Amino acid sequence: MTNNAYKNFTILPKFPIDYFLNIYDKYKDILLNSTYEDFNDVMLHDDASIKLVIFLKNHEITNVVQDMFDVEVPCCGFMINFPRAGVWHPHTDRRPCGLNIPIDVDTTSSHFFSGDVSDAIENKNALDLSPQQDASRRNKKFLYEPEKYQFYNSRHPILLNTKQVHGFANYADTYRTLFSIDFIEPYGDVLETFPKDWYDNDL
């Protein structure tokens, strides 16, 4: 059966993840303390809750990932949520769509959530992920209203509509590590290009 109970994301139980686990095994010893000297064509970000190691368009990893899909992949990389980070603010992205692949996730003490932007209340006092950017390009942040969200523990990869409100919480004593892939096409268009056996399965 198709797991269509979720409005703004689709669970992909049979998406192949071995390549991404191998990338993590290769880089895991330097990811948390990485600098620009450790990689070429990479963007880094750190704050109190999350570290991003993003491989840009010309990176060899992005080129390999691009070959897996029929839609453009502008970048991809690791999202590392810190232990006991709690809830990271609900937000929307500049990218229209993303695929999040669990690498090392405590599925009992962390989760992903998603809701409709039309029901959300914007939190204009929240700090932006990239405050140095022009205000028109920043991600919007929203108040945390769990009664409005659908939740998933990220046991399997998910394709998510990043133009709708989403976020995560990590209450585990361990890092929550995912590999995230950006797409430039809308969520529904990207999903249509995926093989049905990635998501047409009993969970």
Image: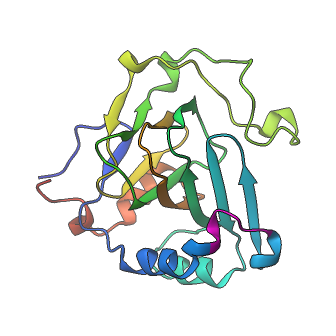
Q: Quadrant of residue 190?
A: bottom left
Relative placement, left or right, of 99 versus 27 is left
Q: Nearer the viewer, residue 73 or 49?
A: 49
Residue at x-position 24% and y-position 59%: 199
Q: Is residue 71 above or below residue 109?
A: below
In percent of width and height, residue 9 lies at 37, 44
Residue 164 visible within the image: no
In percent of width and height, residue 128 lies at 75, 34
Residue at x-position 24% and y-position 67%: 14
Relative placement, left or right, of 125 versus 85 is right
In percent of width and height, residue 168 lies at 47, 38
Q: Is residue 66 above or below residue 126?
A: below
Residue 149 visible within the image: yes
Residue at x-position 73% and y-position 53%: 45
Relative placement, left or right, of 188 versus 123 is left
Residue at x-position 46% and y-position 58%: 99
Please tell me whether residue 32 belongs to the stretch shown in magenta: yes
| Number of callouts | 0
Q: Quadrant of residue 15?
A: bottom left
Q: Main secondary structure of the magenta part?
A: loop
Q: Which residues are magenta?
A: 30-35
Q: Is residue 63 above or below residue 178?
A: below
Please tell me whether residue 182 belongs to the stretch shown in magenta: no
